[in-house]
Image (cartoon, rainbow, N blue to C red):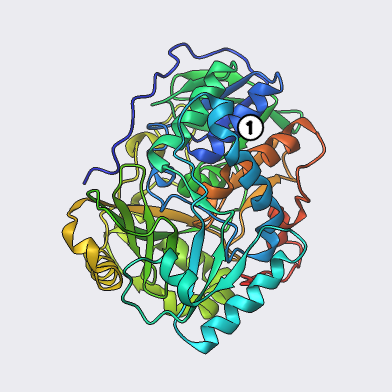
Amino acid sequence: MPGPRLPHFQSDLALPKAVDAVVIGGGIIGAATALELAERGVSVLLCEKGQIAGEQSSRNWGWVRLACRDPREIPLMAESLHLWAGLAERTGRETGFTRSGILYTAETARREAQLERWLRNLDGLGQGARMVRGRQLAELMPGHQTRTCSALLTPMDGRAEPQMATHAIAGAAQAAGARIMTECAVRSLETAAGRISGVMTERGRVACSAVIVAGGAWSRLFLGNAGIALPQLKVLNSVLRTSPVQGGPETAVRSASLGLRKRADGGYTVADAHENIVDIVPDSLRLGWKFLPSYRQEWRALQFRLSNRWREEAAQARRWQPHQTTPFELCRVLDPAPSQKALKSGWAAAQKAFPLLKTADVVQSWGGLIDVTPDALPVISQADTLPGLFIATGFSGHGFGIGPAAGRLAADLVTGDRPLVDPRPFRLSRFSDGTRYGPQTGY
């Protein structure tokens, strides 16, 4: 089943013999990191096993949100909003970013109280976030037929086009001097004197002193071969897009059952906000105890199933040599089938909430595998046991919006510049140093 339609990206053809840094992964995190490094004069090679933004970076909802994030992510996301505002000018390419605002709706007094408590996390930021009701709510949700009594409005938030944004960032990185090679998997790391000295790709060796692993759902597998333990699993989310329709909400809407945002083409991206499928795989057993706090907190939003992914992942090699073909070459683009149940329920909820959508057609749907960590926070960190190795992954469904700032923070760590924000909440060692970890809703 084909994923979202992507523009052509002109890959570099010649593999350099040596660079300062190699970025592994051509999603929005890897592309943003490459752009930051290239603009600082660092020679950088980005290697993508498939195509730019071929996986979750083109399959997400397209939200750029501060709303209802884990409080520990708020400083980084606030910086990302500033970066998104200037990204089209900076890259010279269209990203589709629009400050449309986002509404998190409340249908009950209990949910309203939760949203009001979360709003306190923005005290002092001056972002204009507030609870809305009555006429203002009706104006923001024209024609809605829901039981919404109030909503959290974050007017500084917005939307962008996942099928455009990463290509814009990668293109700008290339223009700034980065080499970007698609269909070029990195097989393994090389070390000398206890630190990174290079990588072996399927096309040959590249010497470097720094490697940034931004491989999304593949990061755990790659790092495991290098002896680095990363607790990360995958969650399936299913999305559809509609034909253009007039008169619908400009502001993105998140309710208990629905996620909806207008697209640049006039249609809508729609998803069931409740159904997130967790396929039971061998790593589910290996990592189950680390994810228990998250499972307990989020069990209403998770659906566990035994599927073909058990067999697929059980058959994957977990260790290999630099000369051997790797799982990354055997699966260039991870393109899971969407959940038909989730698509049907999401579309039904959208039409019920906004009857005008009944005039639209569903023109495409897709699935995407989200890389999640036990506390739903990303890892943006140096690997303490291997100098020169950096990790930027595990964004847990929050990576698209936070991507530009995450790339800047990753680049700060590589170059030793002053970090954009305090990186300690995102350190890899939190999973092994005795820190108590788990999701924080901020409610």
User: Callout 1: few (<14), some (14-19), or many (20+) C-alpha neighbours within 10 Å?
Assistant: many
Q: Residue at x 25, y 71 (%)?
A: 345
Instruction: Work out whether 423 lies above or below 412.
Output: below
Q: Is residue 368 visible?
A: yes
Instruction: Residue 140: give x, y in percent of width and height.
Output: 44, 64
Q: Residue at x 67, y 22 (%)?
A: 39
Q: Residue furthest bottom?
A: 109
Instruction: Work out whether 373 lies above or below 34.
Output: below
Instruction: Work out whether 83 lies above or below 169.
Output: below
Q: Residue at x 70, y 68 (%)?
A: 121
Query: According to the image, label 1 marks what residue?
Result: 211
Quarter of the image where one finds residue 162? top left
How many numbered markers are drawn?
Answer: 1
Q: Residue at x 63, y 32 (%)?
A: 211
Q: Residue furthest front?
A: 135
Quarter of the image where one finds residue 415? top right
Instruction: Residue 44: give x, y in percent of width and height.
Output: 61, 22
Q: Which element carries disc 1, helix, strand or loop? A: strand
Question: Label 1 amino acid?
Answer: Val
Instruction: Residue 36: give x, y in percent of width and height.
Output: 65, 29
Instruction: Residue 141: give x, y in percent of width and height.
Output: 39, 66
Query: Quadrant of the image for the C terminus?
Result: bottom right
Say left or right for 35 vs 278: right
Quarter of the image where one finds residue 185? top left
Q: Identify which residue, 251 or 69, lies in the foreground.
A: 251
Q: Identify which residue, 322 or 165, lies in the foreground.
A: 165
Say left or right for 428 vs 241: right
Q: Is residue 278 visible?
A: no
